Each structure stands twice: as C-alpha cells, then as structure tokens.
Image: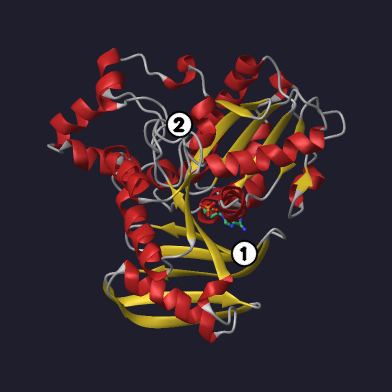
Amino acid sequence: MKIIAVNAGSSSLKFQLLEMPEEKEIASGIVERIGNKNAEFTFKFNGEKFVKKGEILDHSKAVELVIEGLLKHGVINKLEEIEGVGHRVVQGGELFKDSAVIDDEVVAKIASLNDLAPLHNPAHIIGINAFRKALPNVIQVAVFDTTFHQTMPEESYLYSVPFEWYEKYGVRKYGAHGTSHQYVSEIAAKRLGKEDTKIVVCHIGNGASITAVKNGKSVDTSMGLTPLEGIPMGTRSGNVDPTIFGLIAKKEGKSIDQILNDLNKHSGYLGVSGVSHDSRDIVDAAHQGNHRAQLAITIQAKRIADYIGSYFVLMGGLDAIVFTAGIGENAKEVREAIVDRLSAVGAKLDPVANNSRGEKEISAADSKVKIWVIPTNEEVMIARDVMRLRK
Ligand code: AMP
C-alpha cells in the first residue's frame, strides 16, 4: 500500500512516497520557491534525480506537479494507488495528544494554533487543503511534532512566569521534533531490551533539540514555546537572557520582531563564527584554526552536555545517548566535543567507531552509558500513523 508523507512550508513542499507496511521509500522530492517565477521541482526515483524549473504559483499547483511526476515516471499507474496522506504539522498545542484524521474541524483546530507557530501552521494548512482537493477520497492524517512531548509533567512544561499567560495564551513548553525523538528512542529501547529505560535523544540538525525519554515517554525537552529555546543551532541562539531585548532595542533602535529575527536567523553557529550556519563549514574553519568557529562548536557542545547532565539527574540515571539528524548522524567532531564533557555521567566514546559512518554504536567498551548513532526517519513515523488511523 502506498502512503505519501508531506511536509509543507510557506514556500516549499517536501514529500516522500512509501510502500507500507514495508516502510520502503519509493520516491521523494521537493518543490521549492512556490509562488515564484523561478520555482524548482526536484523529483527522486530509482536512484535518479529529475529537476524541473519554472513558475509554480501556489501549493495547489505544486501538489498537481507532484502527482503528475508520480504518474509520468510510472511510480504509480493511477491516482487511486495512493491510499493515504500524512501531513507533518509543527504545532498541535494541547489540542492534539495524538495524530488526527483530518476533517474541517481538525483544520480549524490547527488554524486556532497559528499564533504559536506563525511560520509553520498556516503553511501546513495550505498544503493540507491542496492535497484534500487533489485526493478528496483518501484519508489524510495530521501528525504533530508536539504530541510526543505531551507526556511532559507540569514542572517540565510550565515556565515560571505569571500563570495567566499560560491560562490565557497557552504560554508553555511544547517541544518539537517529536516524531524524530520517538522514532529513534523506540529503536534504542528495543536495543536495550528492557522495560524501564532512560534515554537522551540528541536531534542535532539545522534545528536541534535534546529530549529526556523515560520508559518510552518524553519527560522533558529543550525546545519550548517555539523552536528558538534550548541549545544553540545553525542560526538560532537557543536560551538567552530576555533582558537582551531591552538592551539591543535601546542600543540599536530595533523592534521586537527585528531582534527575534536576529535570534532566529543570525545567531547560533552563524552568529558566533561569522563563517556559516552549516556544520561542515564550521568544522573546516575550526580545523584551520578559526577561533570563532571553534567557539561555535564548543559553546553548543557545552550546552548540549549541560542538558544531558540535567536529564541524567531528572531521570535518575542514563542508559543510552542517541545522536540523530544531519549533524548528529554525520559530524563526528561535534559528537566528540559533546561526549568529551560527559565523564561525570560515565559516557565514553570509542574514537574508531565514532569515525565510521552510518548507524552504529560509538561508545567505548568500558562506557557506563551506551552511545548510538541512529538515523532518524520522520516520514516513516508519519506513514505508520496513517496506517494506524485508517483502520
Ligand atoms: P538537518 O536539519 O537534519 O537536515 O541537518 C542539517 C545539518 O546537517 C547541516 O548543518 C549540515 O551541515 C549537517 N550535515 C549534513 N551532512 C553532513 C555531513 N556529511 N557532515 C557533517 N555535517 C553534515
């Protein structure tokens, strides 16, 4: 059975077609710069890549192109072969404790959360509507980045701010990357082969979050009301003292939105190093002796190690640390910088294993904590939920 997993952004639409229940990727692609004259559609199938450039005015047109591509390349022979669509939705607030079969009411609920994810939820709705129009008789499921973190206790998700902010506006920690944290922590739990497990997942990509997963449930995570909180990322600052707002507004005459933009887009690796947001450039520059590039890695590694230490205390121990996402899976230097700081929790790296690629155990034989690299697969989680909810 073929299920399509969709991730719609404000000007992009990513998809992956999977054969289920085998969980095998059949085709994937991305439409970029939607709404633009020089939009681009990249389609991958059978190890080949096809790129089409031109005007793609809106998401409906992008969905048409995806379906046309699937038919043209013989991935499917007719539309009816697609038996389910799963949509990644960044913010489910407290309204969604599980993935949901999409109907008008679910769309309205997702829209009601727009204030909490102004860049993401409106774009997801556009993508959902475009697919509902193109495939009206097919089940569509919303899979939220936040549901996995809905198990956090109050003391983890509440901020110590005026309580009415939570009651009136939903100001609390929601977390993100939930499907990824769930996917890799389930694999890690299986490997541990026991019921009571204490796992920290380090999802480190352009966006990055650290989650404490106890007995299969998220009990704390580093991202907050939005994906700006937590550890420093490619271009995001992670935690800062909010007093910075007043100081920079006064000194540079900037508005709240401008300062938020600086914290979201001009901070993290990019802000500290002045070199790039990309970990590959940062690692190269650090090797060449660029002090600020070295600092960008060290500051992030320190903050991640601090989170792991605090989650060790929270869970009363630690069985495994898992690295995943673009940097966690690929940047051995970043993993090394983090684990070097973790002797207090008994974590020790095997430098040879850390040097090799792919899914693997990278802890030393005498490490008290297992350390694994486990590639994430958010699309599989989305397709699994479509399968579960279509029954
Ligand atoms: P993601 O957001 O998960 O796609 O991760 C993007 C990040 O992963 C970027 O900072 C990339 O530099 C990093 N990345 C991807 N591939 C590699 C690689 N082979 N070596 C080091 N970093 C990588």
Q: Give the x, y percent position of residue 275.
A: 42, 52
Q: Which mark is residue 251?
A: none
Q: Confirm if mark 1 falls within 8 A of ligand 1.
A: no
Q: Which residue is mark 2?
A: 230
Image-based side of 251 in relation to 73, left or right: left
Q: CA distance from mark 1 to mark 2?
A: 33 Å
- Looking at the rendered structure, the kind of residue marked 2 is Gly
Q: Which residue is mark 1?
A: 18
Q: Give the x, y percent position of residue 95.
A: 39, 33
Q: Nearer the viewer, mark 1 or mark 2?
A: 1
Q: Residue at x 67, y 61 (%)?
A: 20
Say which of 87 and 390 sits in front: 390
- Quarter of the image containing the N terminus? bottom right
Q: Answer with mark 1 or mark 2, whichever residue precedes in sequence.
A: 1
**For numbered disc 1, what is the local secondary structure?**
strand
Say which of 324 and 277 sits in front: 324
Which image quarter: residue 66? Answer: bottom left
Image-based side of 241 in relation to 385, left or right: left
Q: Confirm if mark 2 falls within 8 A of ligand 1.
A: no
Q: Is residue 202 above or below residue 127?
A: above
Q: Give the x, y percent position of residue 17.
A: 57, 66
Local packing at callout 2 (Cα closer than 10 Å; few below 14, some 14-19, many 20+) is many
- Looking at the rendered structure, the kind of residue marked 1 is Leu
Q: Is residue 348 above or below residue 332?
A: above
Q: Residue at x 46, y 33 (%)?
A: 175
Q: Residue at x 64, y 52 (%)?
A: 330
> Is residue 149 among what the camera can see?
yes
- Whether residues under marks 1 and 2 lie with C-beta atoms below 8 angstroms apart, the answer is no
> Is residue 349 among what the camera can see?
no
Image-based side of 109 in relation to 218, left or right: left
Name the quarter showing ligand 1: bottom right
Say which of 39 and 88 sits in front: 88
